[in-house]
Image (cartoon, rainbow, N blue to C red):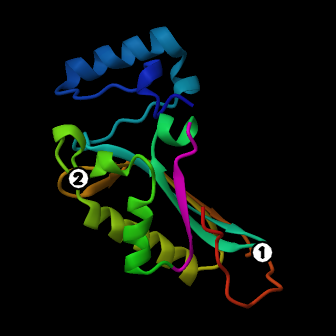
């Protein structure tokens, strides 16, 4: 539960050598619990960027839907997530990225560097295609996805496989406009 929570001290960044890694490990276990409780993960440092969330789920009533938002407070507190039905087109992927209220953070808000939205849109298309091509993939969660000035880094991913839910409506589906 602390793996993505830098605000709670569960993340250490920019560890350059073995000594820094050992110190961070000791601090984490002293403050937060035993290694068995923490299940620590060490990975390559991702480039700095904007943390986002990409999810796909099959809803029995609506079918497969792709969701996107910024990680953390924007999605958790404000519900700032956007959704599209799968399969998405390249235009829908671009629209999905731009439809959240916090989208300006991706495009250079207040002088920050714009991030690689084409790479993010490509990731959205690939997740959509995965779920559309493989009905046994009933849920995908990518969180966080760091979108940097060049490229994206998926730092954690989960995929749930199950028999696809039965659909009795095979007609066109739409999401209501908000």
Q: Position of residue 8 (x, y in %)?
A: 47, 20
Q: Earlier in the sequence, mark 2 or mark 1?
A: 2
Vertical order, 28 against 138 (above or below): above
Residue of label 1: 165
Residue at the image position 56 percent from the left and 76 percent from the top:
86
Quick one: 122 or 176, which is closer to the camera? 176
Quick one: 94 or 116, which is closer to the camera? 94
Residue at the image position 64 percent from the left and 79 percent from the top:
135
Quick one: 79 or 165, which is closer to the camera? 79
Query: Is residue 3 in the magenta section?
Result: no
Q: Position of residue 34 (x, y in %)?
A: 54, 17
Question: How many angstroms separate mark 2 from mark 1 (CA)?
Answer: 37 Å
Quarter of the image where one finds residue 110: top left
Vertical order, 21 against 67 (above or below): above
- How many marks the image carries: the answer is 2
Q: Position of residue 173 (x, y in %)?
A: 67, 81
Helix, strand or loop at mark 2: loop
Q: Position of residue 151 (x, y in %)?
A: 23, 58
Residue span colored magenta: 78-87
Vertical order, 22 against 93 (above or below): above
Residue of label 2: 115
Quick one: 103 or 59, which is closer to the camera? 103
């Amino acid at each position: 539960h602390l793996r993505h929570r830098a605000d709670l001290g569960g993340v250490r960044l920019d560890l350059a050598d073995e000594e820094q890694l050992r110190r961070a490990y000791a601090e984490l276990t002293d403050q937060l619990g035993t290694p068995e409780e923490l299940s620590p993960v060490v990975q390559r440092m991702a480039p700095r960027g904007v943390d986002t969330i990409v999810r796909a789920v099959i809803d029995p009533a609506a079918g497969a839907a792709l969701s996107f938002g910024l990680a953390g407070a924007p999605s958790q507190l404000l519900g700032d997530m956007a959704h599209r039905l799968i399969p998405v087109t390249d235009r829908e992927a671009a629209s999905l990225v731009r439809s959240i209220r916090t989208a300006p953070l991706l495009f250079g808000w207040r002088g920050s560097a714009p991030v690689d939205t084409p790479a993010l849109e490509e990731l959205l298309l690939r997740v959509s295609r995965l779920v559309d091509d493989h009905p046994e993939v009933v849920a995908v969660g990518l969180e966080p996805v760091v979108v940097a000035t060049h490229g994206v880094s998926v730092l954690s991913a989960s995929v749930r496989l199950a028999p696809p839910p039965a659909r009795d409506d095979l007609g066109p589906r739409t999401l209501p406009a908000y």
